[in-house]
Amino acid sequence: MAPMLKDPRQTKAPLRIEWCSDPARERAIVELFMKQLSPRYISHSELQEQRAVAIGEWRPDLAEVLGAQVRHALAQPVAASSSLIATAYAEDSGALAAVAFVSIDEARLASRPFATLDDLVVDASRQGSGVGRLMFDWICAELKPRGIRRLFLESGIGNEDAHRFFEARGCTPVSITMLKELEA
């Protein structure tokens, strides 16, 4: 069992944060993600993958697409997987408080081994309580023993709250991603 984490500034109950490998958690993970959706969340990865069809427009079947992604990640053994899902549960209620999707670079061609924080979603009722910070710090600590030396992430251009959150955690902007539609 993962250790309980408590932030002295946090007013809610302690959290149990762990890499999830339980297929029975798929529905709760997808539901939490879907409840927090906003068009400003969409970044280039949602457009490059299967989640969004245009800037500010999610796919109509997003829940099914996301469910397939979650199922795939949960089917892999955590110790060897390159697609990980971290979950944070409130110890008092057992409710899912946050979820994060992490991809580990398998090619290992970069100058330093890296992972990508694909998503970090905190339940609306717990935003601002320190849950996101605890989850982010836990992920960083968990990746180090795997030899990961860099953590990349990207955020939708209008998601200013997320930008401030990650910059406060020591993340530095390194690029701007642009898109040109080539439709007829």
Image (spheres, helix red, strand yellow):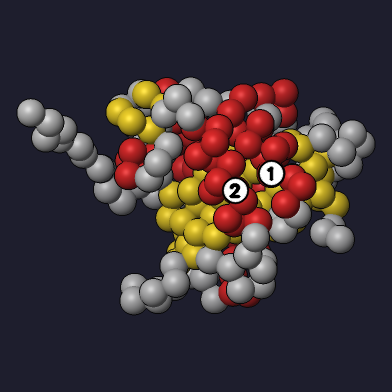
Residue 134 at what x, y percent from top left? 69, 46
* Secondary structure found at label 2: helix
Relative to 178, say whether 81 is above or below: below
Residue 70: mark: 2
> Which numbered disc, 1 or 2, marks the residue that appears first in the sequence?
1
Q: What is the crowding at mark 2: few (fewer than 14 residues within 10 Å), some, or many (at least 20)?
A: many
Can you see residue 91?
A: yes
Amino acid type indicated by mark 1: Glu
Quadrant in which the C terminus is drawn: top left
Does residue 72 appear left or right of residue 5 in this picture? left
Label 1, label 2: how many angstroms apart (C-alpha)? 6 Å
Residue occupying image coordinates x 53% and y 66%: 82
Query: Residue 76 falls in which quadrant of the image?
Result: bottom right
Residue 68 at what x, y percent from top left? 55, 46
Can you see residue 9?
A: no
* Secondary structure found at label 1: helix
Residue occupying image coordinates x 46% and y 56%: 116
Quadrant in which the N terminus is drawn: bottom right
Tell me how many marks there are.
Answer: 2
Query: Quick one: 151 or 66, which is closer to the camera?
Result: 66
Q: Residue furthest right?
A: 92
Query: Quick one: 62 or 161, which is closer to the camera?
Result: 62
Query: Residue 2 falls in which quadrant of the image?
Result: bottom right
Residue occupying image coordinates x 65% and y 60%: 75
Residue 129 at what x, y percent from top left? 72, 31
Which residue, given by chain and number where applicable, does mark 1 sit on? 26
Query: Quick one: 117 or 30, which is closer to the camera?
Result: 30
Query: Quick one: 95 or 48, which is closer to the camera?
Result: 48
